[in-house]
Image (cartoon, grey):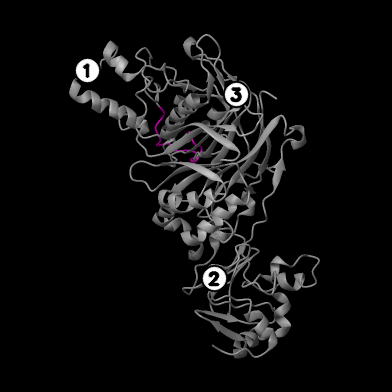
Amino acid sequence: MCSTQNDPDKTLSSLVSHNEKEMDLSRVNIHQTTSFDPSSNQQQSQNFYSDKNNIQAFGSQTVRIPSQQQQHYLTNNSQSSNVFFSPYQRLTPSNRFFNDYRHHSWNNSNNFNSMRKPRHSFENWLTTDEWDYDNDYGQRVRFETQLPKRKWTQVQLEQKFSHRNHFTFKLISFNVLSQDLLEANGYLYADCISEYLDWNYRKHVIIKQIVDHHADIVCLQEAQEDHYEKYFRVKLKEHGYESLFIKRSGGKPDGCALFYKTDRLQLIDHKLVPFHCPTIELLDRDNVGLVALFRPKTSRSSSDDAFCVASTHLLFSPKRGDIKLAQLQYFLAEIDRISIKDDNINVEPTYYPIILCGDFNCQPYSPLYQFLLDGYIQYNQYKRSEISGQILSNCYSLNLPSNELLPSYYVRSDCRFPTKTKTIDIIEQKTTNIVLDDENQDEIIEKKDCIQFSEYLDANNVDNPSAVLIHNKKFHSVYEHFNRSNIPEVTAHINHESHNMDFIFYTTGSSGQKTAAISTNEQQKTTINDRLYLLGRYNLYYQNQLRNVHLPNWQFGSDHFLLLAKFALKLQHV
């Protein structure tokens, strides 16, 4: 190792760590060989880089230290920091160095897709504005935007909801990106720094994102089973959470997890919901969901103060909107069963308030999205690729069928299960065409428990000739999806592309869904207690802010952004 020549070099060398694994997550370091060209004078730049006294070696890194007169371009948060900050992070238009700095003759690039590939096997990374250039040594230096801190948007004044009459709580929905899926689809993350793709780095960033918000409920998608058991479950238990988990079927490594604060919430009921059913064509995929019913742990709450939380991760395939719609139809039926409060056939059914969240793999205002908000869809007027809105047009895509999506003896077209009738009762009454003997009866009942459908059979249900689905929940979205300039919000940023596919929905009051072309028996009114209020949401980034951002990175541990909302639940007996 070379010895330092002067005090300024010692000062700067103290800022570079040979152990990047212990870096402060609130800052970013410089990787591999770092060369800095703060001067517009070419001769000065050459002298600077050729000065052997300005070279320090630390382990496998070589850091070129600027001369004393150039050090004002380098800034850091504290002398004890082991990282560099780029100059632009501290420079503003009012700064006397700003104009000199931004007019350097570097190859500016605002289009990230046009960036050149590195001419060597190593890259340098700084966190600053939107520039890309090749330095004197042929090294490609990429400048990646540091995103500003997200802020809260207050929807309603919290003072209106006194703590005596309302229970306030926060909910997170977060696709944390399964490590196995990341590695299996590495081409999507080719432009990310490999260090930030490592699970041993990502897990600390993800858990910090979660615990910093002190949410009462945390819904995770793509939670890998071994990471759930060995990390998420252990770490979040230290913060007072208990959890539920369902793994995807078919040997898939990940699933959905739900964590809740035990000192704030009591779990009343829950259902783990696999969507796979080998006997039904549109339910042949391995996606899952889970539904839970909670009650606040307060002295003023009663059994009437329950609310339902459901989380899912629907199929990704943009071309198979028919499968997504069928999965949602079945999931809504499971939500209906858990959230129903009073199902007397002589009166309108009443429901507890519902929060539905997750990765829906659809775009805002797509037919699938509108079905949740409107409670109605006539699906045979769409092609399969049009349902989720991920593909604008596909002339080769097939139309959805004109008959029922799912067999009506499993799930009705109003997204409710048929009248409960035990399978064994149906067998004994011989009301179906199923013929069983003693040898295969146990097998059928075992299969019933596995696929979780056959408990609900109704031989009197008929096909749905109008190709219409309805549901009796009135959902609203927590997020608005666009700003006033019509720039879309982003919930996922993958391989240079921004998407809005993660949502939090909540019910407000009674549903007024359309009922045209629906049989009289299916025109059901419903009452959802209007007791759930949205107080605020954690702002998302907009598409124009993510031009030079790659996820995961040092700042964010997943390729999805965390969604967070605050609600108030009005207590019944106060």
Left or right, 319 with respect to 53, comes to left
Horizontal and vertical percent position of residue 96: 80, 72
**Secondary structure predominantly adopted by residues drawn in magenta:** loop
Q: Earlier in the sequence, mark 1 or mark 3?
A: 3
Of badges 1 and 3, nearer the viewer stands: 3
Question: How far apart are labels 1 and 3 at the CA level?
Answer: 44 Å
Please identify the quarter of the rendering in which residue 142 is found: bottom right
Magenta segment includes 10: no
Please identify the quarter of the rendering in which residue 509 is found: top right
Horizontal and vertical percent position of residue 190: 47, 61
Horizontal and vertical percent position of residue 424: 30, 18
The residue at the point 76 percent across, 70 percent down is 99
Residue 230 visible, this angle: yes
Q: What segment is highlighted magenta in the picture?
A: 387-400
Q: Residues within 10 Å of mark 2 (few under 14, many from 20)?
A: some
Of badges 2 and 3, nearer the viewer stands: 3
Q: In the rendered image, which residue does mark 1 sit on?
A: 435
* Amino acid type, mark 2: Glu
- 450 vs 433: above or below: below
Per the image, label 2 sits on a secondary structure element best described as helix
Quadrant of the image containing the N terminus: bottom right
- 324 vs 189: above or below: above
* Amino acid type, mark 1: Val
Q: Residue furthest front?
A: 299
Point out which mark residue 304 bears: 3
Magenta segment includes 388: yes
Question: How far apart are labels 1 and 2 at the CA level?
Answer: 67 Å
The residue at the point 50 percent across, 55 percent down is 495
Q: Residues within 10 Å of mark 1 (few under 14, many from 20)?
A: few
Q: In the rendered image, which residue does mark 2 sit on?
A: 20
Horizontal and vertical percent position of residue 524: 53, 14
Foreground residue, 507 or 68? 507
